[in-house]
Image (cartoon, rainbow, N blue to C red):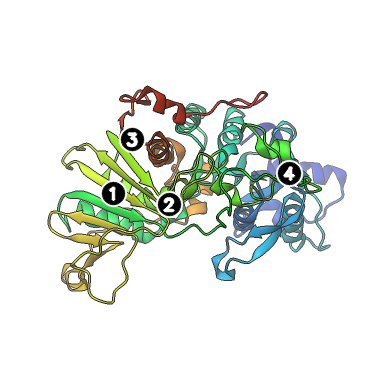
Amino acid sequence: MHKQTRISRRTLLNAAAAAGSLAIVPRHVLGGEGHVAPSEKTTLASIGTGGQGLQNTAIFLEFPEIQVIAVCDVNRESGGYISWNWMQGKEQHTAGREPARRMVDEFYGKQQPSGKYRACKAYHDYRELLDKEDVDAVMIATPDHTHAVIAMAAIKRGKHVYCEKPLTWSVEEARRVAEAAKAAKVATQLGNQGQATQEARIVCEMIWDGAIGPVREVHAWSGPRFWPWPTWEGRPKETPPIPDGLDWDLWLGPAPYRPYHPAYCPWTWRNWWEFGTGIFGDLGCHKLSTTFKALKLGHPTTVEASSTKMDPEIYPLGVLAHFEFPARGDMPPVTLHWYDGGLKPQRPKELEPGRNMDDMIYVGEKGILMGHRLIPESRMKAYGRPPKILPRSPGHHKEWVDACRGGPPAGSNFVDHAGLLTEVCLLGNVALRAGKLIQWDGEKMRVTNDESANRFLRREYREGWSL
């Protein structure tokens, strides 16, 4: 925490006594059981307050250890954002910095005797926020192409960072952000919430217990995209006016300039190579996190990918990718297969008729693990449960909150897990755009068999932008 902005309880009480204005100091000022004194809270700013950003902010508001003091978004307020609260379905909602500011003020207002609270500040430029607000931590939920510049700016200022997946837009950015986080010794967490589940730990424990023997093959897949597909090829030709309240130039950030079009934002940016990383980048960090931990994966040696019709501007409808990983200790080489856009692997013959296929299959020398259960179910019943050797998570967001306050590193921190995970997921896109099998030197961060493919590892930033 930044000591210059923290006031001790004793200082606060002495000041109150000297002023003669307080006979009794309220519990919410002092702290105590169930309360955290204002001087001991971790201050947080939310940067990117669209659908997922609002959802994350609402979660962090519930932590008594956290005080949200600022929000930031390039959009003042508009509709068209998808709800990420799947209990509500996929309805579109209003989002932006003003809805976020109102949500924060209303939440804290309910805790005040007056019922009012007007202390949360709203910014349109994250750089201004970081210059003016001495926050301890930031939550980043902007489009993929601006993750790295915002995360790096926060890390250089010593802020703890929670960032939505993927960590960055490019492989090089992931490497540099992870290195910066390690040097700064800040608490970090990627927004791949599934890594904190009990099921994720059971998969690790079963594989390490030898439930299916050495694993040599993994299949992971995702259904069709859940955002609209462009109805044209290439960029849209129309150039409608920029909506009132949207800073389009700042939304573009480090990406090359192009005219505004609603096909790019507020949330269909995932279609476009310049802004998003497609289904692989969006969901790969979710689905492959447990695989990386259970199989102790590092860098692959080769990556090959193919797809439905390729467009230089737009992520394809469906992608197949294949990663070859070398042996790790007593674990043999393993091939990881990725499928998206509704593509799937062959149905295992061991799976009972009528039973749905889960989206993760581990093929071992002695059996098959689908999700966190052996197939067929008779094998699972005979096996029982693996020895419980991993501590259970207090919750994905709680992991990061605790880490910000001096606790152990979060389960998907940038240094130990999320940086490498993001790099490898984005290598699938590199191989896809290169149009060939690539041989990978992870230590040197270089494609060794095709010099031209290395251009997809990074981007040229627009003038005025840098890490």
Real-space Cα distance between discs 3 and 4? 35 Å
Q: Are marks 2 and 4 in contact (CB under 8 Å)?
A: no
- Sequence-first disc among 2 and 3: 2
10 Å neighbourhood of mark 1: few (<14), some, or many (≥20)?
some
Label 2 vs label 1: CA separation? 14 Å
Q: Amino acid at mark 4?
A: Thr
Task: Give the quadrant of the C terminus.
Answer: top right
Amino acid beneath label 1? Ala
Number of residues whose C-alpha sits closer than 10 Å to that of mark 2, classed few (under 14), some (14–19) or many (20 or more): some
Q: Secondary structure at mark 4?
A: loop
Q: Residue furthest left?
A: 366
Q: CA distance from mark 2 to mark 4?
A: 35 Å
Residue at the spot of label 2: 286
On the image, the x and y values in percent for residue 307 come to 39, 47
Of the two numbered discs 3 and 4 on the same chain, state the one appearing first in sequence.
Answer: 4
Foreground: disc 1 or disc 3: 3
The local crowd at label 3, few if under 14, some if 14 to 19, many if 20 or more residues have their Cα within 10 Å, is some
C-beta proximity under 8 Å, tags 1 and 3: no
Provide the residue designation for mark 3: 436
Residue drawn 13% across the image and 54% down it: 365
**Rendered location of residue 108, percent (x, y):** 73, 58
Task: Indicate the amino acid at tag 2.
Answer: His
Q: Earlier in the sequence, mark 2 or mark 1?
A: 2
**Between 257 and 68, the one nearer to me in the picture:** 257
Label 4: how many Cα within 10 Å (few below 14, some 14–19, many 20+): few
